[in-house]
Amino acid sequence: MKALASFVMRGPSQSAMATTVLTMLTLIFPFVGILGSACVGLVFLRLGLMAGIKTLLLSTLAAGLLMGVIFGNPLPALGILLVVWLPTGLLGMLLRNTRSLGLTTQAGIGFGLLAIVVQYAVLGDPRAFWREYLQPMGQRFVEAGLFDQAQSQPVIEQVSGVMCGVVAVLFLLQLLSSLYLARWWQAILYNPGGFADEYHQLRVHWVVGLVGALALTALLIPGESGLAFLNCLGAVFLGVLFLQGLAVVHGVFKGLRSAQLWLVLTYLLLIVFMPQMVLVLTGIGLTDVWIDYRARFKDKPSG
């Protein structure tokens, strides 16, 4: 990772090359695109606006040429610029100017909310779109014997009702993951250990916690809800509180002699029991807005 970050810092050509290649590899390895966006974020963080714009222009040109050769249409490169690279660059500039990871993380909520608005503007009714999209999959599950016909429809209705929020949260988490990775690269190059200290102190405003609490309550209440749009908006706030929950875990375990073991265990549980652990970590992040676990554990002896 340090070698990649050093390569990106060599100049606009190198940063554009790394951004374009890593982003195009997303077609084969989906999560590699986070590295490509992180290259953009690192340039904005370290070198500022003009260097970042140069990287964006060169990357868009290179991606357009590759898209034209591979797919016969260079226009998707503009979509990548507007949806992936530019938001990461804007968040990088905000973090560079404010030096506040918490503030920048909260600013990312705006992009998550924008993703919801775009879904409603383009799809009209996202729930209806996802219901139609998931219907064939549900039928295949019925044919495979995983569900009977009576169970399939309620499951499709439930999943289609939350997909708008899920898409927005995944988009937000991708942007913030790229930003955090860029900040970590900046730290290992110029300020070793700086990102860890910064992330361990990540806390959002109590208003975010309040909106997240209302959203979590609405999601946990059984029954049909007619406020699908508001539920989608609330899900974005819960995504940020999930990140704060992870920051709490890192911050609390920092003083333990077995910190690495506990962190590995946490991420293993997150992979194996993802829905339950996401809910637990979101709850930790939510309550930390008022309780501040890290301050309570700071003076405790390590063990």
Image (cartoon, rainbow, N blue to C red):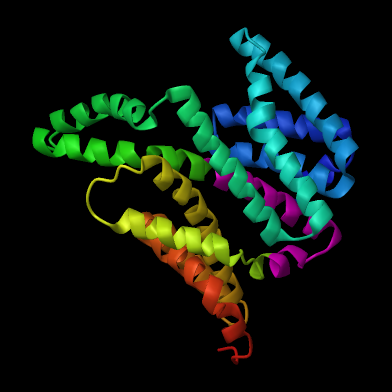
What range of the chain is rendered magenta?
171-198
Question: Is residue 3 visible from the viewing direction of this image?
Answer: no
Viewer-side residue, 196 vs 108: 108
Decide: is 148 above or below 263.
above
Viewer-side residue, 59 vs 121: 121
Q: Is residue 93 left or right of residue 135?
A: right
Write the residue at 81% across / 35% down.
Answer: 15
| Residue 220 position in % (x across, y down) | 31, 58
Quadrant that contains the C terminus:
bottom right
Viewer-side residue, 259 vs 138: 138
Write the residue at 57% across / 85% down.
Answer: 296
User: Which residue lies most toward the front here?
Assistant: 226
Decide: is 78 above or below 238.
above
Question: Is residue 237 visible from the viewing direction of this image?
Answer: yes
| Residue 114 position in % (x across, y down) | 57, 37
| Residue 148 position in % (x across, y down) | 10, 36
User: Which residue lies most toward the top here?
Assistant: 72
Decide: is 223 above or below 76.
below
| Residue 39 position in % (x across, y down) | 75, 41
Residue 185 drawn in magenta: yes
Write the residue at 52% across / 60% down.
Answer: 241
Residue 176 drawn in magenta: yes
Which of the 4 quarters of the picture holds residue 198?
bottom right
Instruction: Give the number of marks.
Output: 0
Q: Is residue 141 left or right of residue 55?
A: left
Which of the 4 quarters of the picture holds residue 273?
bottom left
Which of the 4 quarters of the picture holds residue 230?
top left
Q: Main secondary structure of the magenta part?
A: helix
Write the residue at 55% across / 71% down.
Answer: 289
